[in-house]
Image (cartoon, helix red, strand yellow):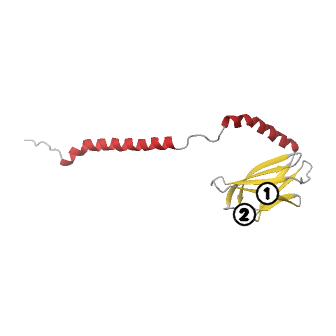
Amino acid sequence: MAQTAQPRPSDRFIPWYIVGFFVGFMALLGHFAYVAISGFNGVVTDDPYEKGLDYNQTIAKARAQAALGFTSTLAWEGGRLVFTLKDKDGTPLTGAKVHVMLYRPVHAGEDATYTLKPENGAYAAKLALPAPGLWEVRVHAVAPKWHYQISRRMVLE
């Protein structure tokens, strides 16, 4: 005579395990949906259409700057930023107002603006950086007959 197998007492919870799995899975998907909806909205810049229209002017200004034939160097020398600007003949250009904007690509909130002073055919200033590391350095030089700008990533310590 064969004995029939009796269900174990824990077998009565199997349907609840299945329900619990799907309830947990739905809770996880709900959390992902909440994060997706409440997070980054995709807007990178305000007024993108107007800025797009202005891009042709930006290209024209870049071509005008290239036509000047200016050359520049940007160096970090012992806590000082030194910017030199020369015309196409190699003569240093003086008499400009030079501003430098520093941006941290990896850390917002430490941006700074400085004015470089004329110094022996160059422009320089001692900068008090909030922290050493990688910086985006944007130089804007303005004179009555021209303006010049460059952007460089530099490690400043």
The quadrant of the image that shows the C terminus is bottom right
Q: State left or right for residue 30 relative to residue 71.
A: left
Q: Is residue 135 left or right of residue 13?
A: right
- The residue tagged 2 is 128
Residue 84: name its quadrant.
bottom right
Q: Give me the residue at 26% from left, 43% from top.
A: 16
Name the secondary structure under disc 1.
strand
From mark 1 to mark 2, how far is it between C-alphas? 12 Å
- The numbered mark, 1 or 2, whose residue comes first in the sequence reads 1
Q: Name the foreground residue: 111 vs 60.
A: 111
Tell me the residue at 84%/53% (across/down). 97
| Marking on residue 69 | none
Location of the N terminus (image quadrant): top left
Q: Circle 1 sits on which residue? A: 115
Q: Confirm or deny contact between disc 1 and disc 2 (CB under 8 A).
A: no
Q: Which class describes the residues within 10 Å of circle 2: few (<14), some (14-19), or many (20+)? A: few
Residue at the limit of the structure toward the left, as seen here: 1
Q: Residues within 10 Å of mark 1 (few under 14, many from 20)?
A: some
Q: Residue 70: percent from the left, percent from the top? A: 86, 48
Considering only vertical position in the picture, is 94 above or below 28?
below
Q: Residue flagged by tag 2: what amino acid is it?
A: Ala
- Outermost bottom residue: 78
Q: Please state the horizontal and vertical placement of residue 63, each as a whole percent of the image.
A: 82, 39
Disc 1 marks which amino acid?
Thr
The spot of residue 25 in percent (x, y) is 37, 42
Is 8 on the left-hand or right-hand side of 113? left
Q: Regarding mark 2 in the picture, which secondary structure is present there? A: loop
Residue at (70, 58) in percent of width and height: 155
Q: Nearer the viewer, residue 51 or 106?
A: 51
Residue 29 at x, y percent in the picture: 42, 41
Which residue occupies the foreground of this view, 106 or 113?
Answer: 113
